[in-house]
């Protein structure tokens, strides 16, 4: 599973860096960037929480090779 931060939507609220610090940091301009794009195992829960908590819905799941994804709010393979 992979994640993506939309640089246009992100407003730098930094919720994601608090919830899933291993996967997100803020760049020099105060906007989020994904540190680890490929998410596995126990990290899925933390990134899912960051996705749910982002005030502007700037983070979403994207499909990796052989995966399908719905609206990006749920991990690939779990969305209808
Ligand atoms: S929580 Fe959302 S708006 Fe805030 S820094 Fe992270 S991606 Fe950007």
Image (tube, rainbow, N blue to C red):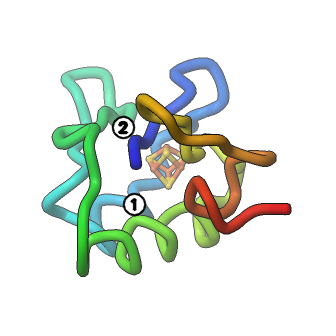
Name the residue beneath numbered marker 1: 16
Please give the name of the residue rendered at 49% of the width and 34% of the height, measured from the top-left corner.
Answer: 66
Quadrant of the rendered structure where residue 20 is? bottom left
User: Looking at the picture, how far across and down is residue 59, in whole percent?
Assistant: 56, 45
User: Which secondary structure, mark 1?
Assistant: helix
User: Which secondary structure, mark 2?
Assistant: strand
Above or below residue 78? Residue 10 is: above
Cβ atoms at labels 2 and 1 below 8 Å apart:
yes
Name the residue beneath numbered marker 2: 32
Q: Residue furthest front?
A: 66
Crowding at mark 1 (Cα within 10 Å: few <14, some 14-19, many 20+) = many
Please give the name of the residue rendered at 37% of the width and 70% of the height, measured from the top-left corner.
Answer: 44
Specify whether tag 1 is near ligand 1 (CB below 8 Å).
yes
Left or right, 79 with respect to 8, comes to: right
Q: Earlier in the sequence, mark 2 or mark 1?
A: 1
Crowding at mark 2 (Cα within 10 Å: few <14, some 14-19, many 20+) = many
Please give the name of the residue rendered at 79% of the width and 46% of the height, measured from the top-left corner.
Answer: 71
User: Looking at the picture, how far across and down is residue 39, in whole percent?
Assistant: 28, 54
């Amino acid at each position: 599973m992979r994640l993506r931060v939309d640089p246009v939507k992100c407003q730098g609220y930094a919720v994601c860096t608090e919830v899933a610090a291993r996967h997100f940091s803020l760049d020099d301009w105060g906007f989020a960037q994904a540190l680890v794009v490929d998410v596995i195992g126990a990290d899925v829960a933390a990134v899912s929480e960051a996705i749910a908590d982002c005030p502007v819905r700037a983070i979403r799941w994207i499909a990796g090779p052989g995966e399908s994804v719905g609206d990006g709010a749920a991990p690939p393979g779990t969305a209808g």
